[in-house]
Image (cartoon, helix red, strand yellow):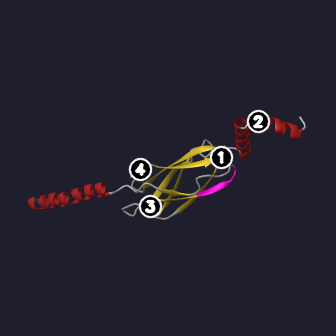
Amino acid sequence: MKMKMVATCLCLLLIIPALSLAAIANEPPTAPDIDGPTRGKIGVEYEWTIVSIDPDGDDVTYYIDWGDECGGAEWHGPYPSGEEVILTHMYTVRNTFIINAMTADEQGAESNWTYFEVTMPKNKAFTINLLFLRFLEQHPNLFPIIRHMLGL
């Protein structure tokens, strides 16, 4: 009986550190790298490539917040560690957006956040009009000449 109890205790002494070592050994994945356009037009679907590496080789899932109200935040995956994933999104309003992304491995360890800025420019015609008005402000003597040319 004593021998059996000693063997059980020794067995537990070997198993418990192995279990706690396995729990401690899980490393979080790297913060995702995002590559893609930094400027675009509204109403056009664009592609961004995202990749993260898990040091333990676990599959990874990406959490992406596109920075606009339309797209919301989405989970994508799981994907093998280190695999480049192509994600698409379309912006519907002109503005500058911040794409927020993080990675989680299959054990639940989470990476740091990555931020990627995307600009959907303002209307070009409006910008050109502003530039023309600034030009006229800087050259007030041209206004009468232009007015005469237009017959006003």
Q: Nearer the viewer, residue 112 or 119?
A: 119
* Label 2 CA crowd tier, 10 Å (few <14, some 14–19, many 20+): few
Q: Marks 2 and 1, Cα distance to the nearest angstrom?
A: 33 Å
> Given contact means CB atoms under 8 Å apart, are the residues at marks 1 and 4 in contact?
no
Q: Quadrant of residue 134?
A: top right
Can residue 72 be spotted in the picture? no
Residue type, numbered disc 2: Asn
Q: Secondary structure at mark 4?
A: loop
For marks 1 and 4 on the same chain, the one whose residue lies earlier in the sequence: 4
Residue type, numbered disc 4: Asn
Can residue 11 be spotted in the picture? yes
For marks 3 and 1 on the same chain, the one whose residue lies earlier in the sequence: 3
Q: Nearer the viewer, residue 24 or 40?
A: 40
Q: Which label is found at residue 121?
A: 1
Q: Marks 4 and 3, Cα distance to the nearest angstrom?
A: 17 Å
For marks 2 and 3 on the same chain, the one whose residue lies earlier in the sequence: 3
* Label 1 CA crowd tier, 10 Å (few <14, some 14–19, many 20+): some
Task: Confirm whether the magenta stretch covers residue 44.
Answer: yes
Q: Residue furthest front?
A: 141
- Magenta segment: 43-47
